[in-house]
Image (cartoon, grey):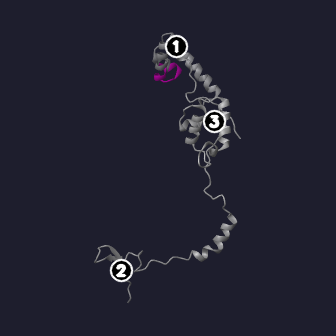
Amino acid sequence: MIREIPQGDGLADAERVARERIRLQAVERLEDGEKNREVTAALRVSERSVERRRRAWRERGEAGVQPKGSPGRPRLGEAQIARLERELERGPLAHGWADQRWMLARIETLIGRLFHVCCTVEGTWQLLKRHGWSSQRPARRAIERDDAVVEVWKKETWPRVGAPRRRAAAGSSSSCAARRCGSCGGWRPSPPDLS
């Protein structure tokens, strides 16, 4: 199931309207000749933001202070996204990859091949999330696995082959009782104590 997530800057409509209202008030105050500090105090915004607005208004006029929208807006139209979803459903094998795993880098490559658009791995992930796709990790389990047979093997076969291991004792290679070899200088186990 694919669900639509609203695109944009992550703000609700009411928050976006409030931000636009504050932006317009700042422009009006700047046009009236107010200083940056006065605008900052009156509208409770950062001085840096006011200075950026003043510079844009001075350089480009009204067009300079118009909202630009979200910088992360996808470069794919609705028809392209619908095609991408169809291609993703066909699977990686249909597009030349050796296995059935869609990875972000592969999807990024597919977008480039299909639409001649460059995007980052992060941008690809954001696009997929906006359109309801999610990250999925495959269970590390063989397709041919039969859980009933595995349980029988654990109960019947494993006790026979999984005999307890011999404990380390003096003379075994896993014990700490070792000494240097006189001929090669390497370490060798001490001889067992026969007394």
Q: Position of residue 23 (x, y in %)?
A: 55, 19
Q: Which residue is mark 2?
A: 190
Overall secondary structure of the magenta section? helix
Q: Is residue 42 left or right of residue 135?
A: left
Screen quadrant of the C terminus: bottom left
Q: Residue at x 65, y 74 (%)?
A: 156
> Which of the two discs, 2 and 1, sits closer to the camera?
2
**Residue at the extreme top of the image, as rendered:** 32
Q: Is residue 42 left or right of residue 191?
A: right
Reading the chain from its start, which is encountered first: label 2 or label 1?
1
Reading the chain from its start, which is encountered first: label 2 or label 3?
3
Q: Is residue 21 magenta?
A: no
Q: Which mark is residue 70?
A: none
Q: Which residue is mark 1?
A: 29
Which amino acid does the dot numbered 2 rest on?
Answer: Ser
Q: Position of residue 164 (x, y in %)?
A: 54, 76
Does residue 19 lie above or below 28 as drawn?
A: below
Q: Residue at x 58, y 75 (%)?
A: 161
The answer to which of 180 and 41 lies nearer the viewer is 180
Q: Which residue range is magenta in the image?
A: 41-50
The answer to which of 24 and 152 lies nearer the viewer is 152
Q: CA distance from mark 2 to mark 3?
A: 68 Å
Mark 3 is surrounded, within 10 Å at the Cα level, by few (under 14), some (14 to 19) or many (20 or more) other residues, namely some
Q: Which residue is mark 3?
A: 130
